[in-house]
Amino acid sequence: MISIDPVNTEFVAEIGDVDLARLTDAVFAEIEAAFNRYAVLVFRHQPLTEGEQLDFARRFGELEVSIQPFVATPGGKRRIQTGFSDISNLDENGELLKDSDNRRLINLANQLWHTDSSFKRTPGKMSMLSAQHVVPSGGETEFADMRAAWDALPAERRHGLEHLVAEHDYFHSRKKVGLDPATITPERRALRPAVPQVFVRTHPASGRKSLVLASHITRIYGMDEADGRRLVDELMAYATQPQFVYTHRWAVDDVVLWDNRCTMHRGRPHDESLRRAMRRATVSDDGPTIPENWQPDRNHVDA
Ligand code: OGA
Ligand code: MN
């Protein structure tokens, strides 16, 4: 039996008495049950190899392939293998990124509240970070519970939200941190078209509803643009209040995984002259949240 220590009553749990490099199906089933209940799981002292981390992540589903239209990887060389997103301020040789390196932009976008890959038709289900280099202060990762935010929303404020459809755009959050729109060539745009996502969703395992928010949201279909932006801004501020947020302070060999279907997260700033390096494996959701044949001129989806 694994040990489960809730950090917040129903949001974050620290899991102990487990070696993630040597999992049995039975132990994984316990972890999966905890994942479905808490949404964020923290494991300490798990020095996983790249292969072990990918094997663990694969138990949750199909690994997502990460293509980042703006990430220069000279000669295709990477710091870590392609199954991962490189969440670090290091280059392919493990050296600190130069100020001019556009990979810094990706790191900055990670400091905005978001959920992973909601800018893809099939968004991320589970993401898992393992920490190799940590900074002594700053550089925390914060998680916000979108189920608790939904539950706490007054009934009259919830009204009408459940049928809304939002447009999510990879480039929207990048523009917010300084990406020059002129660099979004048609080729890059074709790699990352804007996509529709439900605005409220129900978690298949727990049956709990949650808001689907992210800094990738550009607009609400069928709503005046300014009104849509106001609604999204209001709910983003509401859903990230301290009572919905857990702050993770990293130690080397921490493994943290989270359910992108019902959380948002963001990285916090830190001294960029210090190394911070993590590997992220992400598993895709079971399919799109909006049917492929949905038309943007329809401003809602039937629940
Ligand atoms: C991520 C992410 C934030 C951080 O890995 O998906 O957004 O704290 N990370 O680095
Ligand atoms: Mn992220």
Image: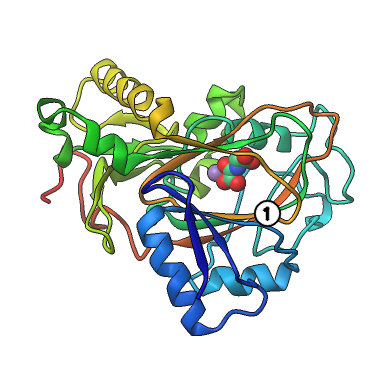
Horizontal side of residue 297 vs 212, given as left or right: left
Question: Which quarter of the figure has residue 241?
Answer: top left
In what quadrant does ligand 2 lie?
Answer: top right
Task: Please tell me which residue is depicted at 28% across the width and 54% down the height of the picture.
Answer: 289
Report whether residue 280 is seen. Answer: yes
Cβ at disc 1 under 8 Å from ligand 1: no
Horizontal side of residue 46 vs 143, given as left or right: right
Residue 78: where, in percent of width, then height? 79, 56
Which residue was labeled with disc 1?
Answer: 254
Nearer to us in this view, 168 or 206: 206
Nearer to us in this view, 154 or 299: 154
Render colour scheme: rainbow
Question: Which quarter of the figure has residue 153?
Answer: top left
At label 1, counting other C-alpha atoms closer than 10 Å, the crowd grade (few under 14, some 14-19, many 20 or more) is many
Task: Please tell me which residue is depicted at 34% across the width and 63% down the height of the picture.
Answer: 287
Residue 163: where, in percent of width, then height? 14, 41
Nearer to us in this view, 301 or 285: 285
Which kind of residue does numbered mark 1 sit on? Asp
Of helix, strand and loop, which one carries label 1? loop
